[in-house]
Image: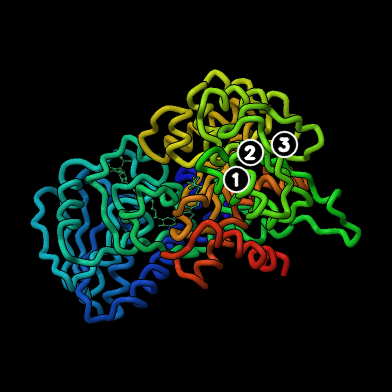
Amino acid sequence: MKIFTSAQIHELDKYTIEHEPIDSIDLMERAAKAIARSIAEEWSTATPVVVFAGPGNNGGDALAVARLLAEQGYGVSAFLFNITGHLSADCAANKDRLVSVKKIQQFIEVKQEFDPPHLDAGTLVVDGLFGSGLNKPLAGGFASLVKYINASPASVVSIDVPSGLMAEDNTYNVRANTIHADLTLTLQQPKLSFLFAENQHYIGRLKVLDIRISEEGMAKTDARYHIVDENEVRPLLKKRSDFAHKGSMGNALLVAGSYGMGGAAVLAARACLRAGVGKVTVHSPKCNSLVLQISVPEAVVQLDQEETVFSEPVDAEDYTALGIGPGLGQSETTAIALIAQLRRTQCPIVADADALNILANHRAWLQQLPKGIILTPHPKEFDRINGHCADSYERLSRACDMAERLGAYIIVKGHYSALCKPDGHVAFNPTGNAGMATAGSGDVLTGIITALLARGYKQADACTVGMYLHGLAGDIAARSLGKESLTAGDIINYLPQAFMRLED
Ligand SMILES: NC(=O)C1=CN([C@@H]2O[C@H](COP(=O)(O)OP(=O)(O)OC[C@H]3O[C@@H](n4cnc5c(N)ncnc54)[C@H](OP(=O)(O)O)[C@@H]3O)[C@@H](O)[C@H]2O)[C@@H](O)CC1
Ligand SMILES: Nc1ncnc2c1ncn2[C@@H]1O[C@H](COP(=O)(O)OP(=O)(O)O)[C@@H](O)[C@H]1O
Ligand SMILES: [K+]
């Protein structure tokens, strides 16, 4: 699913109005009907409803919803904030329509002074102050109103966007002046800012309402951001030929583990095998010899000359992919071996965990990374490499810049892991769950992506399929085991079911 920016949404509105064709007031009515329907599904007509409408089209939606709910028998009070004396045309039209409805309990157009209504726990607030047209942080009376609503025990439904939250960039926003919704009814598509962890408590539950924006318009519009779906992943999966043999299914090299972190190498190697690779070799310090041979008997174990750390680059000529970093440690010996390994390796590479921490400590080395390298930082690892980011939007922008500059594929991991490609596009992964917030989950992802690279998937496809499978395995695991007890090893154990679901 493409994620359009507010500016693009505005253009798509116009496209729909022109090409469907439909009057803009009727498109607004369509949105309002979908919103009123969703509200009626959850709140009975006995619920007192207080609607707050702003001066733009978000306010127009809200006034139309107020009318529709009043017509259905709800007790509705509506407040329209017209401070500047200017309403959008469709907001003004909906004001006129609302006023003509006899069933509305109270309608107040606020021009200056505002005496806020009492909001108790049984009240439903409909927040239609601002949506995708918000262009600066809320201040003054609007900020006070938002704080008043947030401090009340009322339930809050936000139309399109919780008022005060920008649809994309909130880096310089005043977060205290943002509505905390219990439910956000967003139109057509989630907004970019909804995918960021720090905005979850403003959005509450999210429902996306289809308002039938022109399919043709959306198909024609290039979106920088999109959310991956199963239909995109299925065709990317490589078929296994009947004549396959282990030599034709990829030869992966994992450089992983150090003293006390042999488990990371084990997890990456097991995940790599479960992701369908022909052969796996794990290069690890001598101390991990037994643990690897016992835990992953299918893998070839190649021991470093050192007892406790990775110290010598491996001749990677025969391998079809390299995964490097899980549990590697950050000793200076390892750092030097790592950069040597990255420089001399010709096959596709995924670098994770301590490989990234080492790069963060030697930022000049970033320029020497081979083009096409895949980096899989979690947010903290990314900030170590890049410098502190104020929020997820800034981090995403910086990751996109870095991907472009280095010609790298950067996966910033999280609930919606974001794959930033060198061409500036970003793919968000929708699978996965909070049960995966457990040590070793990232090592599993590294193993999976290494396997896919080794099998010949292009970098972008290996990342997309890898992220999707990893999260899907976690989701299937959580269904059987619950989220609390899920471990990284469980994600590996459920990879077969994830594959089978995609191959169905
Ligand atoms: N395809 C769709 O998705 C459809 C979307 N629809 C709906 O349209 C909504 C977008 O409507 P919109 O463009 O009119 O913007 P909206 O959010 O109402 O705000 C604009 C107004 O706010 C003002 N303003 C801005 N910031 C401010 C501030 N900090 N403090 C004070 N004022 C501020 C700004 O004034 P300005 O600064 O420009 O003078 C302007 O007056 C969208 O969210 C959805 O609900 C549906 O109706 C149909 C299909
Ligand atoms: N709440 C969540 N929802 C979805 N995926 C998650 C969640 N928490 C963690 N994950 C996934 O688990 C992995 C964790 O990776 P990472 O932070 O590197 O863990 P570790 O370093 O312990 O291996 C990432 O792929 C991430 O996307
Ligand atoms: K809103």
Residue type, mark 1 in image: Ala
Residue type, mark 3 in image: Pro
Residue 220 in view in this figure: no
> Percent from the top left, x then y, of residue 214?
58, 57
> Percent from the top left, x then y, of residue 216?
63, 55
The relative height of residue 277 versus residue 328 in the rendered view (above or below) is below
At a point 71% along the width and 48% down the height, the residue shown is 451
CA–CA distance in space, label 2 to label 3: 20 Å
At a point 38% along the width and 67% down the height, the residue shown is 35
Label ID, residue 265:
1
**Viewer-proximal residue, 389 or 296?**
296
User: Is label 2 or label 1 in front?
Assistant: 2
Question: Does the beta carbon of the residue at mark 1 sit less than 8 Å from ligand 2?
Answer: no
Residue under pointer 3: 348
> Percent from the top left, x then y, of residue 192?
46, 47
Q: Is residue 166 left or right of residue 77?
A: right
**Viewer-proximal residue, 487 or 367?**
487
> Percent from the top left, x then y, of residue 50?
21, 66
Element marked by disc 3? loop
The mark nearer the N terminus, 3 or 1, is: 1
